[in-house]
């Protein structure tokens, strides 16, 4: 596979490593939503990139075709200090124009704060990158178990020759010289590092960072630090926290699609996709199960209430039955 040009990963190039981590996560989040009815001039991938990374975009008609355009809010503000205009500069379309939101374009957002996922991506990717670098260093330091002290170059060469022969699988040689006898031989200094513990802790930290990142994006990922097995209840403790952001992003997109349809007469729709859709179906099934249980309990309570009479049992003629212990002449 030499023709692919693979080479060692450079952890020290932080900018490139950070880009790679975010790009890897975007490969996942770009499958979060499925759009139907988009015109050919608005690719789903480009629309999602605008929303997820910029936080907002507009859809406008350019030369009779609809395009999703990135730009910046600017100009006069409304009563809530939100700019009314959106400035777009697109060299490929030879377009430099200021649009008015809701008048000649539809303004859409990724979330209610219009921030997108960029800040979240940078935060978790930076934490993950620093953890990767520390793990990489700890991994290299694991090779260093002892430090060898040599009194001169001859001893150094002799010891390296010994190591090379051992690496090749040859029998070790005994090296004896007057210098070694006088200097008490080669001094071996045990390395005091505790890289085993550091590697274990770094692996756990990286697992926690990655799981937290996935959880914020609505995917279940276990980050329980217990060394033994966990039960199903412990594994589902954070499920309620998976819903809010994804639900907010879906609602914003549905409002965006509805506004585009109203202004331009299209038939665009959007729904969850992939793992997020499967989780939504799972949540809906669990919610329906709880509703059925609650409804069954309510029906049982109503049945118990309607089937009993605090005044006692009723006879066939409608009169209360006398108790077996009732005394004659006593009502």
Image (cartoon, grey):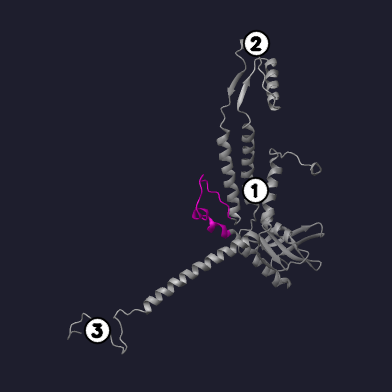
- Figure quadrant of residue 10: top right
Q: Which residues are magenta?
A: 220-244
Measured from the top left, where is residue 43 in percent x and y? 75, 62
Q: Secondary structure at mark 1?
A: helix
Residue located 59% across and 63% down the image: 280
Identify the mark nearer the N-term, 1 or 2: 1
Quarter of the view holding residue 154: top right
Residue 225 is a magenta residue: yes
Numbered label attached to residue 322? 3
Q: Verify CB contact (< 8 Å) between mark 2 and mark 3.
A: no
Question: What number is the disc on residue 179?
Answer: 2
Quarter of the image that includes the C terminus:
bottom left
Q: Is residue 212 magenta?
A: no
Q: Quadrant of residue 132?
A: top right
Above/below status of 270 relative to 91? below
Looking at the image, residue 231 sits to the left or right of residue 77; the answer is left
Q: Residues within 10 Å of mark 1 (few under 14, many from 20)?
A: some
Residue 199 vertical position relative to residue 94 in the rendered view, above or below? above
């Amino acid at each position: 596979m030499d023709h692919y040009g693979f080479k060692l990963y450079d952890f020290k190039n932080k900018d490139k490593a950070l880009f790679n981590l975010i790009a890897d996560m975007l490969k996942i989040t770009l499958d979060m939503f499925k759009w139907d009815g988009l015109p050919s001039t608005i690719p789903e991938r480009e629309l999602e990139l605008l929303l997820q990374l910029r936080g907002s975009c507009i859809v406008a008609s350019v030369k009779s075709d609809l395009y999703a355009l990135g730009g910046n809010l600017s100009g006069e503000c409304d009563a809530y200090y939100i700019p009314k205009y959106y400035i777009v500069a697109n060299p490929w379309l030879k377009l430099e124009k200021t649009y008015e939101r809701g008048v000649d374009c539809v303004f859409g957002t990724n979330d209610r704060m219009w921030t997108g996922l960029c800040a979240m991506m940078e935060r978790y990717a930076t934490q993950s990158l620093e953890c990767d670098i520390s793990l990489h260093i700890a991994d290299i330091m694991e090779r260093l178990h002892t430090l060898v002290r040599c009194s001169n170059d001859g001893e150094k060469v002799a010891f390296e020759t010994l190591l090379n022969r051992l690496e090749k699988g040859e029998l070790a040689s005994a090296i004896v010289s007057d210098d070694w006898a006088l200097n008490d031989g080669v001094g071996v200094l045990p390395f005091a590092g505790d890289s085993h513990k550091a590697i274990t802790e770094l692996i756990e930290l990286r697992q926690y960072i990655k799981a937290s990142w996935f959880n914020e994006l609505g995917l279940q990922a276990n980050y329980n630090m217990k060394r033994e097995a966990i039960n199903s209840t412990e594994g589902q403790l954070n499920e309620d926290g998976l819903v809010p952001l994804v639900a907010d992003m879906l609602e914003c997109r549905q409002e965006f699609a509805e506004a585009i349809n109203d202004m331009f007469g299209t038939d665009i729709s959007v729904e969850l996709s992939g793992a997020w859709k499967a989780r939504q179906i799972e949540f809906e099934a669990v919610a329906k199960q709880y509703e059925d249980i609650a409804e069954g309990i309510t029906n049982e309570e109503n049945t118990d209430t309607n089937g009993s009479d605090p005044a006692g049992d009723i006879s066939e003629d409608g009169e209360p039955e006398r108790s077996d212990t009732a005394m004659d002449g006593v009502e």
